[in-house]
Image: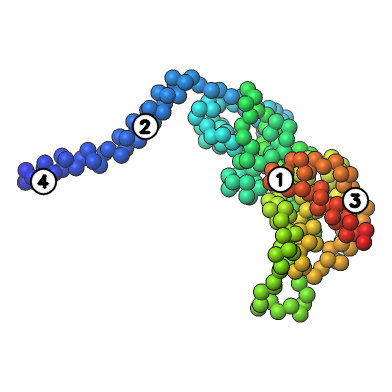
Amino acid sequence: SQSPWLRRSSRNMLPAVLRPASAVRSARLHARVLSTAAGSNMKTFSIYRWDPDSGAKPRMQDYEIDMNECGPMVLDALIKIKNEIDPTLTFRRSCREGICGSCSMNVDGSNTLACLCKISDAPKVKIYPLPHMYVLKDLVPDMSNFYEQHKSVQPFLQTKPDVDMSVENYQSKEDRAKLDGLYECVLCACCSTSCPSYWWNADKYLGPAVLLQSYRWLADSRDAKTAERLEFLDDAFKVYRCKTIMNCSKTCPKHLNPGKAIAEIKLAMDH
């Protein structure tokens, strides 16, 4: 049989084991009481829905969310809707920190990354997929053409054949600084899909995102294929369909300037 001392010790230990879970439940209850006292803060999210397998036409579907129980970003709301209201809602997301570029979409008329876009104070938030791209489902655009265009500019460092790859390829601080504002691009396509010239000529015009990526390698002092890169771009469409509308620079969620990069490419081609 169990000794009296052990029985007393067990009774004394039991509350210590349960206390953390009890404290968590108490904190949650307290939060609910405060939320109820403050009143709900309901907001409507009107989201583009289309399922190609259903045969139905695209539609806008409204979801109501209590903002007292939701994070501050549009992606927080989308994840809450998918997890708690409608698991069929489809969208891309990954890092939640503006690094991967996956959650690009159109929110209240502006292309942005949902993870970096704060939910507005308006009573209704409208969310669409990126404009002028084929839609695979709901908020998921078909990025195939965009990625093929990116591949076409050979977005990687190309050195001379006789370069010794076993030693570091040094770059001065000044030359390295020329890449600032270029390498940060996350290929979200917000800029390209905001560009009317890209809407009209997406099959031939490379668009601001890809051209910024192209200039990133043209500006790299370690790259040895400048002439070949410029020759590839030298036709009537790849670069020169840019009409300096500058939607690209206005909409970039990373605050980059694709319009300036395109201007630098044109200047290099003219020389």
Task: Tell me the distance, in whole angstroms, between the alpha carbons under discs 2 and 3.
Answer: 60 Å
At horizontal 64% and vertical 43% (from top left) the residue drawn is 103
Give the structural element (helix, strand or loop) at label 4.
Answer: helix
At horizontal 54% and vertical 34% (from top left) the residue drawn is 71
Residue 266 in percent (x, y) is at 88, 55
Q: Which residue position holds label 4?
A: 6
Task: Tell me the distance, in whole angstroms, between the alpha carbons under discs 1 and 3.
Answer: 23 Å
Q: Earlier in the sequence, mark 2 or mark 3?
A: 2
* Residue toward you, 200 or 233: 233
Do the residues bearing badges 1 and 2 touch, measured as CB atoms within 8 Å? no
Colour treatment of the image: rainbow
Residue 30 in percent (x, y) is at 38, 27
Q: Is residue 101 above or below residue 83?
A: below
Residue most extreme to the front: 174
Q: Which residue position holds label 1?
A: 255
Q: Which residue position holds label 3?
A: 240
Task: Tell me the distance, in whole angstroms, between the alpha carbons under discs 4 and 1.
Answer: 66 Å
Task: Tell me the distance, in whole angstroms, between the alpha carbons under discs 4 and 2.
Answer: 32 Å
Residue 120 in percent (x, y) is at 63, 29
